Amino acid sequence: MFIDDDEGTDDALLTHQTLIDTQERLGALLDLMPTGLIIHQMQGILYANQQACFLLNESEESLIGKHILDFTGDDIRDTCSELFMSSFVEDHPIQFPQIKLSTYPEEPRFIKVTAGRLPWEGTSVVQLLLEDITELKIKADELENLTFHDVLTGTYNRRYFIEHAEKMVEKAIKDKSCFSLLIFDVDWFKKVNDTLGHLAGDEALKSIIEVWHKNTRNIVDNTRDSDGKLARIGGEEFAILLPNLDMEKAKYVAERIRKAIEENIIEFEDLRFNITASFGLTELRADDVTLDDLIRRADIALYRAKEQGRNRVECE
């Protein structure tokens, strides 16, 4: 809200005149900038060049008077608000968190915003530099996807499993909460490859991911991203992280997945076949120190499942 006094009015008029002078002298040049430029006072936007209007998907007329926070998501708005206020008093540039613009719902666009105080006389203003980082964001996501995801199945890979699981185990130990680990692999997978072909074998591995998605919704307690807990950690070997589940509940999950894999008919070209899998399950114990303790026991249980006939769940 503007301060209704002579001093405040004079400051506002001085700022307005400075803005007019800037536009008259540099307006055409500012519109040629490849970087979006916004001049912003506490209450709202005073000026935006053409690139800023393009990035925010607004006309200059509709943008004037709006606030940069109108374009931030709810998850970062409070953080951006604090940084925005700080930019009016700090002498160094301030970097906002990466902003996903809500003005492009069908084709998301990401921008980087840098704020800096302008040494103008009158009402305090800052300049915001807007840089389109959509292409960089897409490439970074692709790189992360290649780094942490299995190319064939699309699920997480062994690297992700180790890094993520270690953090989850540390947290569970610290919080003294339940945590279970399930390791399984496909029975007689070499026989599938040798008799039906490697492409059929690939299809069999991909079918496990489909089974997982269909059979784990709403059964893993207190996890918002249940399918983020499955990883392919070897050729035909998978691991499932089950935070907040004790052995009894984890075994229910294991049996459900085992049965669903057994009953699932895989169709590939003119082939119709099914596979089975053997499961080794363990839970976090009071004397466990690292993830390796759980992996060792889960492997022991898995080998026992194979020795006792396969297509079964064993606990250790």
Image: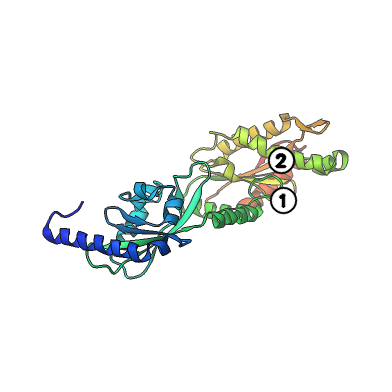
Q: Which label is found at residue 206? A: 2
The crowding category of the residue bearing disc 2, from other C-alpha atoms within 10 Å (few below 14, some 14 to 19, many at least 20), is: some
Q: Which label is found at residue 85? A: none
The answer to whether mark 2 and mark 1 are in CB contact below 8 A is no
Q: Nearer the viewer, residue 46 or 231?
A: 46
In the picture, measured across the screen, residue 56 lies left or right of residue 272, that is left
What sort of colour scheme is used for the picture? rainbow
Q: Residue at x 33, y 63 (%)?
A: 24
Residue 311: x and y in percent read: 74, 36
In the picture, measured across the screen, residue 279 lies left or right of residue 101, that is right
Vertical relation: 167 (above or below) 264: below
Q: Which label is found at residue 234? A: 1
Vertical relation: 155 (above or below) 79: above
Q: Residue at x 45, y 48 (%)?
A: 101
Task: Using the rendered image of the protein, determine whether residue 241 is visible from the camera's viewpoint.
Answer: no
Residue 4: x and y in percent read: 14, 54
The crowding category of the residue bearing disc 1, from other C-alpha atoms within 10 Å (few below 14, some 14 to 19, many at least 20), is: few
Query: How far separated are the C-alphas under marks 2 and 1?
Result: 14 Å
Q: Residue at x 51, y 38 (%)?
A: 221
The tag earlier along the polypeptide, 2 or 1, is 2
- Which quadrant of the structure image shows residue 267? top right
Q: Nearer the viewer, residue 219 or 302?
A: 219
